Image: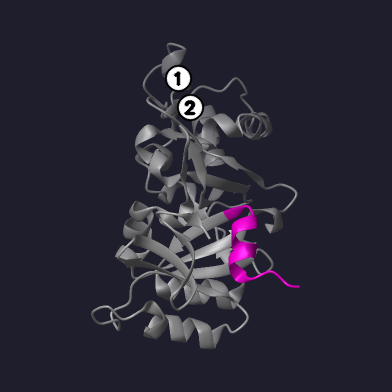
Amino acid sequence: MSKSIGERFEKISRLYHFTSAKAAFSIIESGKLRFSKSFRLNDLIESNRVVFDHMLHGGDTCRNDKDAFAEDEMRRYQVISFAQDRDYQGRQFLGFDLHTMWGLYADKGYGVCLVFDKEKLDLKDADWAGNVRYSDIIPQDFEFKSKSRLGLKNEIWRRREEIFFNKRKEWEYEQEFRVIRRVSEEMNMEYLNISDSLCCAIVCKDYSVVGMESMFDSDLFRDLHYSFRRLPILTYEYDIDGYSLFEEFMNPIWTEQCGFM
């Protein structure tokens, strides 16, 4: 007997990507998720990485070739960020239940949360994936031992966890699982194939819904359902018991009070 959507959803190791409705349609249709350039990320520290080797070694205030090579190399790394589930101090924080992520990245709740099976991510051999760690203080500047381009390339790769997987504690709400990829040219457009790992989409709000109508009656749900018939569409809605996750109208698979049903 095949498992229901709810049973499959509960059992998989889930990753979440919050985005606008327009972007969600493009991602689902193409089967690709675009990498972001590291110097265009929201985190100011990540978008302004600098090397101060000349100052650390008593040089003048002019930048040298080594600094420029290192910064150029770091800008060749691109990033895809997912939210994930997290257990903390005896409490579980589920990725689809993060209201900050809905508000900041999914068009104030009018966008879409795409859900992926972590075990089915189609990573290239040179990709690197892992959890982001959060600390009170994160350095924005780096010192490198190598002097040649090749040496700096290898050193930055060896220190990839230190450089690309540490953020300030204020970003902890994102519960981020990150994939990085080094590209040959920093302006290259890189994509992750998600055609096999995408398992469902979750919708929360839509301007077509009036009063206490369900999201199953929304234009957004219907458009997603008819455009991508093989992709399960879940709704994340507020009712008298708080927020719940539905696979069918009045049939929740998860509630804030009871967890997974």
Q: Position of residue 223 (x, y in %)?
A: 46, 86
| Res. 76 in view | no
Q: Which residues are magenta?
A: 1-14
Circle 1 residues within 10 Å: few <14, some 14–19, many ≥20: some
Amino acid type, mark 1: His
Question: What is the quadrant of the N terminus in the image?
Answer: bottom right
Amino acid type, mark 2: Asn
Marks 2 and 1 in Cβ contact (< 8 Å): yes
| Res. 228 in view | yes
Which residue appears at 43% of the width and 23% of the height? Answer: 52
User: Is 93 above or below relative to 188?
Assistant: above
The reply, left or right, for residue 63 in relation to residue 196 is left
Q: Nearer the viewer, residue 117 or 58?
A: 117
User: Is 72 above or below relative to 81?
Assistant: above
Helix, strand, or loop for circle 1? helix
Instruction: Report which quarter residue 69 is drawn in.
Output: top right
Residue 25 part of the magenta-drawn span: no
Helix, strand, or loop for circle 2? loop
Task: State the scheme by which the image is colored.
Answer: one colour
Q: Residue furthest top?
A: 58
Q: Mark 2 highlights which residue?
A: 64
Q: Nearer the viewer, residue 100 or 133?
A: 100
Mark earlier in primary sequence (2, 1): 1
Query: Residue 196, which numbered label?
Result: none
Q: Mark 1 highlights which residue?
A: 54
User: Is 80 above or below relative to 128?
Assistant: below
Q: Residue furthest bottom?
A: 226
Which residue appears at 70% of the width and 54% of the height? Answer: 119
Which residue appears at 41% of the width and 51% of the height? Answer: 40
